[in-house]
Amino acid sequence: MSAIETRRQIVDVADKLFYEHGYEATSFADIAGEVGLSRGNFYYHFKSKDQILEAVIERRIAKTGAMLNAWQEDAGSPLDRIRRFIRLLIANSAKIMDYGCPVGTLCNELAKLDHVAKDDAAHLFALYRDWLARQFAALGRETEAEALALHLLMRSQGVATLATAFRDGDFIRREVADMEAWLQAQCPVTSSPQF
Amino acid sequence: MSAIETRRQIVDVADKLFYEHGYEATSFADIAGEVGLSRGNFYYHFKSKDQILEAVIERRIAKTGAMLNAWQEDAGSPLDRIRRFIRLLIANSAKIMDYGCPVGTLCNELAKLDHVAKDDAAHLFALYRDWLARQFAALGRETEAEALALHLLMRSQGVATLATAFRDGDFIRREVADMEAWLQAQCPVTSSPQF
DNA sequence: GCCTTTTTAGGACATTCGCCCTAGATATCT
DNA sequence: AGATATCTAGGGCGAATGTCCTAAAAAGGC
């Protein structure tokens, strides 16, 4: 197999295992075992565990950026785009109840480890923040765009954490509905001006 | 020194280290070193690392319960009591920006490890939830009390996670103000009825 | 001041960790 | 097919992990 393909497989598996069991709790052997490689061969592709983490974060950033770009291209209002973000909680609710949010839990773990890559991981949040801020700006909320984006991001994180702790899918649905209502209320109602 | 006192010290240190560096990343040696005990002696007090975790959770539950009871006894309206909870985010903002919320991050880690104690850790959330629900019920919101409690808990978790990732104290203050405004809006305005 | 109980220190255990080396297998190109 | 570059398997390194044992120190009752 080509080295590039193998490398991609390693990053794929590492991504999954880091999410499901955490970075520290995932060992070289775990990744190698799932990929079907010998432990020794690993070093040919990655010189250290930190390098795998870097590659995983890089990959997540690329995938997230691609997803947000695709959402941007899609037909639909900024409001619809934001709703799409909110509904990620529904689409991923099963995994979230098992393992939490991939971004939030990774950032938390790396913060505790005081890991060099913790800022890289936080960049994932920045991607969502900036994309959401763009949508709010397009809705005519330029000045508060970033604050509104962070607020929504904050909510999704809180929902994920509590949903994991209580394993409560109804809670997710309830809070998603509440977020959508909040979103609607943020939208200046130009169609029915009050005069 | 008495065994009880030593045990208490171990749990104290373990509590701190589990919070600051995580459960997995904290070793017997780390705890022993900080307490000033030899690693071997450890086994006299705790038969396994899981037992320390259990003791730490038990201790956190006791302390949290005591704090909430004290808040309950305090003079002040249910509204003031809820505000007191919200302002935990301000009081602990420095540690939160470094290590996140002690409850949320522990629950997340234990969920990923699929640890036996993960439900015990989630019980910490339940303490807050039930106490908050009591306050909302006292405010006349009996039917939605638990949902409102979870909503507030959710917000505090989201704020903690983002504050850690971005290390942004202003964000905490902004969201706390928003939570207090939300809280005010939840309160039926009996003093100025609309008729 | 002795004797029993409680608490301690230090080391050893098997295992796993991340990391590294090397010889051989596999693929690629001429 | 032969030569060369690429990729792999397996094992071994020292350090660290959680766990366990034992002999000595400390504490406490008589």
Image (spheres, coloured by chain):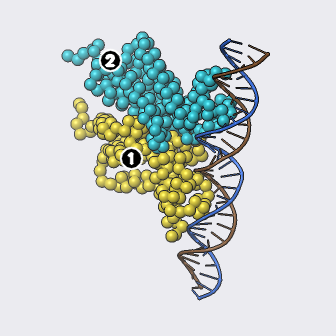
Chain colours: A yellow, B cyan, C brown, D blue
Q: Are marks 2 and 1 on the same chain?
A: no
Q: SS of the residue at dot 2? A: helix
Q: Chain of mark 1?
A: A
Q: Identify the residue position indicated by label 2 in the image.
A: B138
User: Which mark is on residue A95?
Assistant: 1
- Residue B52 lies left or right of residue B146; in this view the side is right
Q: Nearer the viewer, residue A83 or B150?
A: B150
In the displayed structure, D4 sits above or below B48; it is below
Secondary structure beneath disc 1? helix
Residue, x 62% and y 37% (percent of image)? B28
Q: Residues within 10 Å of mark 2 (few under 14, many from 20)?
A: some
Residue A107 in percent (x, y) is at: 51, 43
Of the pair D24 and A1, the residue shown nearer to us: D24
x and y percent of residue A86 in the render?
35, 43
Q: Which mark is residue A127?
A: none
Q: Give the position of the C terminus of chain B as an image quadrant.
A: top left
- Quadrant location of the N terminus of chain B in the rendered image: top right
Residue B61 visible in the picture:
yes
